[in-house]
Amino acid sequence: MEIGGYKTDTQVGHIELVMRLHKHMKQMKERGRIIYIPDPICSVKVPETWRQLRKQRAGWHRQLAGSLWEQRNMIGNPTYGWMGMVSIPYFILVELMGPVLEITTIFLLISGMWLQVVDAKLCMVLALLLVLYGSLLSACAVMFEVWSSRRAYTFREVTRLLLYACSETFWFRPMNNVFRIYGLLQVVGYGKKDSKNGKG
C-alpha cells in the first residue's frame, strides 16, 4: 500500500515491485524480509507456437530492462545494501546483457578458430565442459521439480524432460538468446513491438 502496489505498466514486471519494496525498507530504515512463497497463486500462459514464445521472451526482457531503468538510482548505491551493490549489477551484466555477451562470445570463438588465432582443441574442451555443466544443472533442476512437485510424473514424462534438459544448450538456449536480444532491440528502438501496447 505504501509503495503504490503493483504497477500495471507493461514495460515493468514483478521484479520492479521487489526492488521498490527493498528501496522503501532501506529508506524507512525498517527491518524486514522479502520472502519467496513456493505455492503459486497465479500462472503463466504457456506459449503454444514459436511466435508466442518469441513474444513472451522478448516481452520479459523488455520488462527486465524497464524495471532496471525505473530503479536505476539504486545501481551501485551502497545505501541499498546487497540489492544496490550486487543484485541489480548482476541483473544488468548477467540477465540483461547476458544474451548479447553469449552470442558475441560464440561468434568471436568461431571467428578465432577460423582465423587460427585461437587454440581449437582448447576451445572444444572448454565448450564440452560448459555443455556438460549446463546439462547437469538443467537435469538436476528437472529432478528437483519431479521430487518436490505435488503432481505425479510418469516415467515417460521424466524421460522427455531430462532429454530436453540435456539438449537445450544446442537449440533452446541459442534461440532464447536471440528472442531476448530482439526484446533488447525493442527497448532501444530498433525493433517493432509485438503488439499495440508492447506487451509480450
Image (cartoon, rainbow, N blue to C red):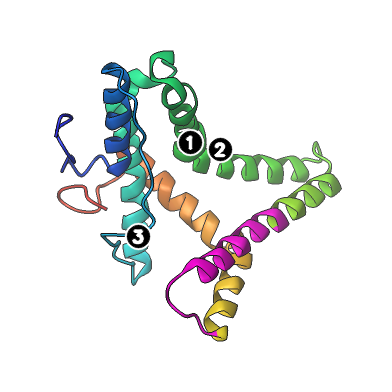
The image shows residue 191 at horizontal and vertical percentages of 31, 44
How many neighbours does mark 2 have within 10 angstroms: few (below 14), some (14-19), or many (20 or more)?
Answer: some
Q: Is residue 54 covered in magenta?
A: no
Residue found 63% across the figure and 44% down from its top = 107
Look at the picture and state if 56 lies above or below 106: below
**Tag 2: amino acid:** Leu
Range of magenta residues: 132-154
- Image height check: is 181 above or below 21? below
Q: Which residue is mark 2?
A: 101
Q: Main secondary structure of the magenta part?
A: helix
Could you tell which of marks 2 and 3 lies nearer the N-terminus?
A: 3
Residue underneath mark 1:
97
* Image location (x, y in percent) of residue 5: 16, 38
148 lies left or right of 191: right
Q: CA distance from mark 2 to mark 1?
A: 6 Å
**Circle 1 Cα neighbour tier, 10 Å, few/some/many (<14 / 14–19 / ≥20):** some
Q: Residue at x 30, y 61 (%)?
A: 44
Q: Which residue is mark 3?
A: 39
Residue type at mark 3 is: Asp
Q: Mark 1: which amino acid?
A: Met
